Image (cartoon, rainbow, N blue to C red):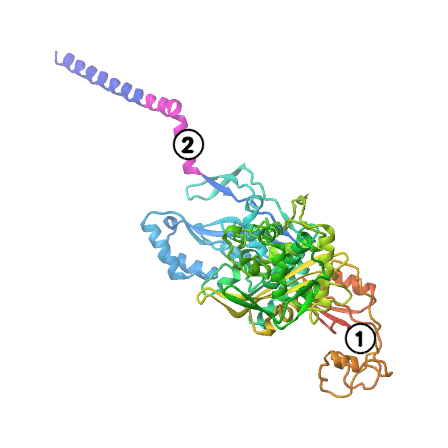
Amino acid sequence: MDEAVARVKADRRLTWLIAILLCWGAAILAKLVSTQIFHHAKYVADARRQQERKITLPAVRGNIYDRNGHPLAMSVSADSVSVNPLQVPDLSVAAELLAINLKGVNQEEIYEKMRWQAENHKGFLVIKKHITPAESERLHSLPVNWIDFANETSREYPNGEIAAHVLGGVYQQEKGVAGIEKAMDPVLEGKPGMLSMLTDVKRRGIDERVEVPAQPGTSLTLTIDERIQFVAEREIQEAVIKYHSRNGTVVVMDPYTGEILALANYPTYDPNIGPKEGDNPMARFNCGVQVPFEPGSVFKVITLSAALETTTLRPETMIPTGNGALSLPGRVVHDTHAHGTISMQEVLEQSSNIGAILIGARVGREKMYEYVRKFGFGQQSGVPLAAESKGLLRKLDHWGTTSLASVSMGQEISATSIQLARAASVIANGGMLVKPKLVYKRGDKLEPTEAPVRILKPETAITMRQMMEGVVLRGTGRHCCKLEGYTSGGKTGSAQIFDTATKHYTHSYNASFMGFAPVTNPQLVVMVTLNGTVGEAGFGGPSAGPVFNKVITEALRIRDVPRDIPDAPEAPQLIQAKAEKPEPMDEDDVSIAGLSDGASIIEEDPDANPLVTNAVLTGPRVPDLRGKTVREVVQQSSEANLPVLIEGSGIARQQSPRPGAILPEGSKIKVVFRR
């Protein structure tokens, strides 16, 4: 009996055990069905999140070239370093290793950042972006697994400050922040891709797969000529320093296409270096595009053009400028000295304010406003650069009693250097208003040129060219703007700067010169501006004129423009026996020391041997090789059979002997190149 009861109890326990096992198996089966069938996608996604890393593949930013294919901006590959503080075994040791191997990383600062992130359970900290190849090699050689590397691109500007204001810069996430880098950012930046990486438990890469390939940005070729840009920057820097100006600008433009061959500003900056405390804030302003100023007397070109179009005035028409003073309501306008009754041609040549006012009065308010607008003032020129100013041209119903007089001589209006270069192009190209062009090609595709608009009759433009040539031959530009081998025309400007605090014009000037060459078939327009010059030495002729002369002479040579003035016969060049340099001769001295009496002009040649006396130095003349590439120098010297000694690489910056000197037999021309 007892045995039967025990057996029943054993069977009951076995039944319960089997029931429990069946329930357990059913639960496991249900969980497997749920996991593998109903929630399969969810758990797969969770597993992928733990095992895979999604990495953005940055698109390579398009390069920027000058019109001859020389690189101005390029993107190069560089590693960026990051760590996961949660995986670092010893934060203090890690901070020491990173500080030793990475320049500019402070050990204490990086330790505090890692400690804070670890305490706050944050697993990603960028240590340094765009490290050097040497730094990357040192870090890769360390026997640690907590350093992560991301291959990115870094923007470099191989020529440093050259064309800095045109290019702008790229500082964060490869985004353009100024210049063409910002204006054309959508074209340059490309489209990023996506990389999927399979990792182990320590987040180390095992396998990877490119899900979306990155699309590189489109490269741009600019209309800028690096050689002309270098010359323009060199000359405007020298002038700003010499005349103690606040800033200066040079614009070189093709008058027929609007192509900008050079746009130089000083002070300037290196786009490879980001802004930092203590920098000159004006250095990063593209003054030629962003900063308008009262143009002063260069604006008389617009006044006289309007007069030729709308009145019966002609260059020979006499204008009674009187005793050099003209009373207007509330003020008196002066000329530099009394001109009396002079022709309209002489009004431009002598830059008579009174003459310009009287001519403007003949044009009238409505027509003057109409032609100022036609020349593009008071509106953006359309150059593809960020923050272009449209200047200031008040609407006609806001003009005061003397506004017509003021505008006629370039006051009560403000304009940028790019607008004035555009206005000068109208005269140079025969009366057409062009749109400034800065992008020559996108990739391999030529950028279309916008059709110009006629605003002057061809005969008006030709007449103005001849009148502006008179400024160089007989007027305010005669001492500084005559070119060797080329005819030229232009207009000086010396606009007094208005003090908004005292409501008076000061004795500080916006000195400027706009001009073109050659006169009969202008190939280049150059606009020079110096802001904040002082005294007569800071007038447009003495200060801005020489910059125009040097820049356009070099640019004409670089562009291979044929000369239109024959070279004068050269006198033999003798060497003086005395060591000291003779006093310079003025114009009268030159005429007295002429060759009419059979004597030769004696000059001192600093490149000649001072021990040689009373001997005529013979040999080839040294050409001007500055601003050329190594290849161009070698080619030119080979064609002329001249021996050269090359030092450095890049663009020719210096040479010895100087251009025009006689090269003694057995000597070489030393040319120094720098980037």
Looking at the rendered image, the disc whose residue lies closer to the viewer, 2 or 1, is: 1
Q: Is residue 247 above or below residue 396?
A: below
Circle nearer the N terminus (2, 1): 2
The amino acid at mark 1 is: Ile
Q: Position of residue 165 (x, y in %)?
A: 57, 57
Q: Residues within 10 Å of mark 1 (few under 14, many from 20)?
A: some
Q: In this view, does 573 lie above or below 426?
A: below
User: In the image, which disc is placed on residue 45?
Assistant: 2
Q: Which residue lies furthest to the right in this view?
A: 598
Q: Position of residue 316 (x, y in %)?
A: 73, 62
Q: Residues within 10 Å of mark 2 (few under 14, many from 20)?
A: few
Q: Is residue 4 above or below residue 494?
A: above
Q: Give the range drawn in magenta.
A: 28-52
Q: Which residue lies furthest to the left in this view?
A: 1
Circle 2 SS class = helix
Q: Residue at x 56, y 38 (%)?
A: 213
Q: Where is residue 38 in the image (x, y as percent from the top left)?
A: 38, 22
Residue 447 appears left or right of 278 = right
Q: Can residue 82 be found in the magenta stretch?
A: no
Q: Where is residue 196 in the image (x, y as percent from the top left)?
A: 49, 38
Residue 240 location, quadrant: bottom right
User: In the image, which disc is placed on residue 662?
Assistant: 1
